[in-house]
Amino acid sequence: MKKIIGLVFFILLLSGCGANHEKSQGEDVSNDNTVTKKGVYVGLADTHTIEVTVDNEPMSFDITDESTTELDNLNNGDKVKVEYEKNAKGQLLLKDIELTN
């Protein structure tokens, strides 16, 4: 009987931890942390990431649904302005990218 009570307590303990973890994942991005920088478009790193050189440092940005249409018009070496947000996991989420002169 003690084993069953211990097992039930352990399962409830784990399920409570999972609920807190799920809640924090839904709060990844806040509108207050949007950053805008100028840089040079390097290109696609993979199917969902681009690379832009900002302040002589390569930066990788995860492509979001908001930013996919602008990418078709960019070439390697283009000067761009990027608008992005950093989520709780440290990922840089591209919100907007546009050509600059």
Image (cartoon, rainbow, N blue to C red):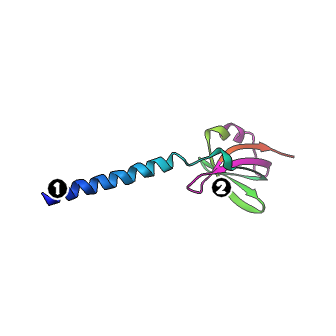
Q: Position of residue 5 (x, y in %)?
A: 19, 56
**The N terminus, quarter of image:** bottom left
**Which one is in front, 73 or 66?**
66
Which residue is most to the left? 1
Label 1 sits on residue: 4
Label 2: state its secondary structure: strand
Q: Can residue 77 be found in the magenta stretch?
A: yes
Residue in view at x 16 percent, y 60 percent: 3
The quadrant holding residue 17 is bottom left
Q: Position of residue 86 (x, y in %)?
A: 63, 52
Label 1: state its secondary structure: helix
Magenta range is 68-93
Label 2 sits on residue: 60
Residue in view at x 61 percent, y 38 percent: 65
Q: Amino acid at mark 2?
A: Ser
Q: How many marks?
A: 2
Inter-mark Cα distance, 2 to 1: 49 Å
Residue in view at x 15 percent, y 60 percent: 2
Which residue is most to the bottom? 56
Residue in view at x 59 percent, y 57 percent: 90
For label 1, the crowd category at 10 Å Cα-Cα, with few meaning under 14, some 14 to 19 and many 20 or more, is few
Q: Amino acid at mark 1?
A: Ile
